[in-house]
Amino acid sequence: MSSGARKMDAMEAILTRRSIRRYTSNKVPRELTTELLRAAMSAPSASNEQPWHFVVIDDRTILDEIPKFHPYSDMLTEAPMAILVCVELIPEREGFVVQDGSAATQNLLLAAHAKGLGAVWLGIYPWEERIEGMRKLTNLPNHIVPLTLIALGYPAEQIPREDRYQPQRVHSNKW
């Protein structure tokens, strides 16, 4: 989205965001990456602990290694960058760090879409092979857990909006 393009409101961003797996070769400017990370860090977190850490990956050799241990990450061979969302293990609230990191991931995805970027969420946690692969590639300390990896770039594909609302999945007061 160019600087002259119209702004996307929150509902439009939520309802039109799609998983994008094809990217142009255009690099994502550092300032835009910072905006995405600012959005991610604005996510809610239990007790406002904010246990997240982010590893911005734009080194082609690192991106090309990931599909060797993550079976659904082939798009990284053309994505100009990815952001690894990690969480810090906090013993007394370990059960909430996954939710906190997931909220940060969703904020990042929505911000990327609103800014004209394409992105796709790649699950890392709880698959041990993926966790260890990312840990080794990015030199993560033991108390930091890689949770999700977001492939990012300017989209080379457009996926139409899909209405996913299912009224049969909505229950009032009781099942």
Image (tube, grey):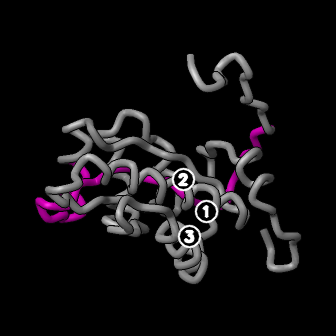
- Name the disc covering residue 69, or none: none
Residue 11 in the figure: left or right of residue 112: right
**Closer mark to the observer between disc 1 and disc 3:** 3
Residue 92 in the figure: left or right of residue 126: left
Mark-to-mark CA distance, 1 and 3: 24 Å
- Place of residue 23 in the rendered image (x, y in percent of width and height, measured from the top left): 63, 53
Tags 1 and 3 touching, CB below 8 Å: no
Going from N to C along the chain, the mark reached first, 1 or 3, is 1
- Name the disc covering residue 106, or none: 2
Tell me how many marks there are: 3
Provide the residue span drawn in magenta.
Answer: 133-160
Q: Is residue 50 above or below residue 171?
A: below
Residue at 31% across, 65% down = 51
- Of 36 and 153, the residue lying toward us: 36
- Place of residue 95 in the rendered image (x, y in percent of width and height, measured from the top left): 26, 46
Q: Is residue 145 above or below residue 43?
A: above
The reply to whether residue 40 is visible in this rendering is: yes
**Kind of residue at disc 3:** Ala
Residue wearing tag 3: 39
Residue wearing tag 1: 25
Residue at 71% across, 49% down = 14
**Kind of residue at disc 2:** Gln
Residue 100 in the figure: left or right of residue 30: left
Mark-to-mark CA distance, 2 and 3: 9 Å
Tags 2 and 1 touching, CB below 8 Å: no
Residue at 55% across, 47% down = 120
- Place of residue 8 in the rendered image (x, y in percent of width and height, measured from the top left): 81, 63
Going from N to C along the chain, the mark reached first, 2 or 1, is 1
Q: Callout 2: helix, strand or loop?
A: helix
The reply to whether residue 54 is visible in this rendering is: no
